[in-house]
Image (cartoon, coloured by chain):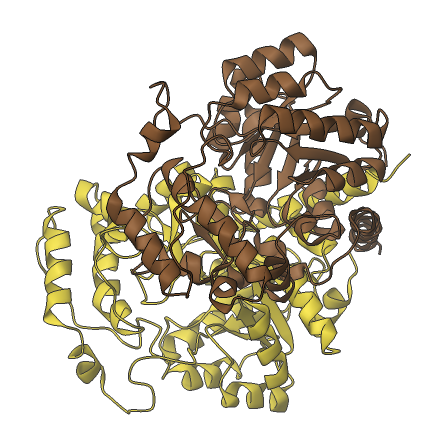
Chain colours: A yellow, B brown
Amino acid sequence: MKTPICDQYGIEFPLFAFSHCRDVVAAVTNAGGFGVLGGTAYSPDQLEQELAWIDSEVKGKPYGVDIIVPAKFEGKGENVSTTQLADRIPGEFREFVTELLAGHDIPVEEKKPRLGGSGLSGDTGEQLLEVALRHPIKLMANALGVPPDYMIEAGRSSGVPVAALVGAKEHALKQVKAGVDLIIAQGTEAGGHCGEVSTLVLVPEVLDALASVGSDVPVLAAGGIVTGKQMAACVAMGAAGAWTGSVWLTTEEAETAPATVKKMLAASSRDTIRSTGRTGKPARQLVSDWTKAWAPTPGGHPTLPLPLQNMLVEPQLRRIDKLAATGHEGAQALATYFVGQGVGLMNKVKPAREVVLEFIEDYVTAAERLSGSLDD
Amino acid sequence: MKTPICDQYGIEFPLFAFSHCRDVVAAVTNAGGFGVLGGTAYSPDQLEQELAWIDSEVKGKPYGVDIIVPAKFEGKGENVSTTQLADRIPGEFREFVTELLAGHDIPVEEKKPRLGGSGLSGDTGEQLLEVALRHPIKLMANALGVPPDYMIEAGRSSGVPVAALVGAKEHALKQVKAGVDLIIAQGTEAGGHCGEVSTLVLVPEVLDALASVGSDVPVLAAGGIVTGKQMAACVAMGAAGAWTGSVWLTTEEAETAPATVKKMLAASSRDTIRSTGRTGKPARQLVSDWTKAWAPTPGGHPTLPLPLQNMLVEPQLRRIDKLAATGHEGAQALATYFVGQGVGLMNKVKPAREVVLEFIEDYVTAAERLSGSLDD
């Protein structure tokens, strides 16, 4: 394939793969796509190690880093310590979590609030970016609002393009104005943080909005895309390529918790929910006893703002994953992870490389099917 | 264009247009698509008149009729009168509606509960179908569950294909088993009654599910489709064509209330909500003071089951439309109608024929864009 974005990013196929797993990132890049490491959950030292490993694997082929720097979060600009932030979690919320676990035969185990590691505090982004820029990254991406000034400036001075995820055309216009080089229009069917507009509507709406202000910033489609035919659908609508995440969670390389992989393979597209129960912001995830306990499930407990909800629950969710892997039934009922509606099409564990090759084949078939429909 | 479904239905372009307006149905059919009249809100006599008019306009070109026969509804099989059903509406609900109107400077005006005309009672379907089958219809469609036996049997004996709308792959499998000839996979972005899965995920998921049971029943894509490029996207994924509804609401021919048309032209894709506030079942509609007053808007009033909610509110909503047209501000704030997220792409009033021609042009451009991406 040869599209403008392929030339620009030095890739053969405009499939961008977001993953927290370095093996997936390297495998996708080596298969002709573009791997993007989700760096937010790492400490700067850990990120350095991960990127050094990727460099040795991809040998100059292009990859990127995604660092979530929320534009808004509890404690922003207040210079508060992790402990001080943790003190803002009401006791009643801690008790609710304790009861929820106890109701699933999981005894209380007080966990230190993790802030840096919880990934959504917003204050480690600059350090992580400094680490990333010591490596030959070809893209830095941001979610949850307009990237901070230091990211836009780092992009300008380093020549590394800056990408931003948006869930509404209004946000796309704001991002382009702020100087972003690549828009990722992410529909509500996406795993993780997402808006309410579907990919099929959002992609043309964002493209129209950008055209109306004379912007030619390329737009990747995201949200629900786990096959080449869906990617082809988005390119037919004018997207420059696809940004994917969920599909890599059930690859051989991924570090997804085994009980969760099992759930994902069995899930239909209706087994996800857009819930604030994990981070405090609406994020799509697998339905489980965990998501059922929190709003917006009717009768569910209210949730805290970002990053307090995340600080409260993430350590427990990691504990749940470990217990679930040992066969603990209560933990298996609670286990959940971010995943999009595309989970309904993810039915087999495969190597990441095979996923890329299947994407390409499926994409070509879809393109031929569509052009075939024009024949008289 | 030449696709199997074009041959089967005798059309030039596999664009199916659902509308309550006979002028839209005739215009789309005459432009090479396939118009489908929403017949549920008519009495049998009215439907007879509408279809006779369409016959005289389309002169043998194909069109169809859509009759909603809900599989489940309050009072089903009980042989209750409209008055008896109306008695099941709690007084507190009537008072809430009165207060909601009063809060928008609309004085109380008791309205008789309309059942047949409210369209969702489920008990006029058979009579409407009998009327429809006296005309040369080429499709009968049903929503809200597996079509009743009499529809499937009427399809068999008359040779008229039966179509069913589904929002989940499980429903598609059930429908095909029941003998349906055409599946309409309708995503959550659709106007009116809809499920939770997006079109981009639902279409391939339904196609995979049907293939897994060896079914070759064709699948139309629906939900959010208001442009040819979105239709092309769905055909690339394997859909046999598109089923549309919202896009016809802002055509010159449509009988949409003027204040609502104005709102639709100004709306972005985020100005809709999947609410039970109009029919008692989740249906996507324009956000307004009306939808904000009812669940699932946080703090909104609970709603009644189908058809009680519809009986309670539909006469008032029609009154609101009339008042809004006179410039009444309170009524304008309340006015709403079923519409999908594609409303964000509907920005101009056009003749229905022009919409069809633009669809075709946009479809061809999208197909060329996708096949162009394959060139080396």
Is residue B5 in sight in this rendering?
A: no
Which residue in the rendered view is the most extreme toward the top? B157
Q: Give how far across and how far down residue B46 sits, in percent.
A: 64, 29
The correct choice, above or below, for A141 with respect to B180 in the image is below
Is residue B227 in sight in this rendering?
A: yes
Q: Give how far across and how far down residue B246 sits, in percent.
A: 63, 49
Q: Quadrant of residue B158?
A: top right
Residue at x 59%, y 85% (from the top left corner): A178
Which quarter of the image is occupied by the N terminus of chain A?
Answer: bottom right
Q: Is residue B293 left or right of residue B136?
A: left
Q: Quadrant of residue A214?
A: bottom right
Residue at x 67%, y 17% (from the top left corner): B133
Closer-to-camera residue (B115/B326): B326
Count of numbered circles in the view: 0
Closer-to-camera residue (B80/A9): B80
Closer-to-camera residue (B239/B267): B267
The correct choice, above or below, for B130 with respect to B326 in the image is above
Residue at x 80%, y 31% (from the top left corner): B3
The correct choice, above or below, for B86 with respect to B233 in the image is above
Which quarter of the image is occupied by the C terminus of chain A?
Answer: top right
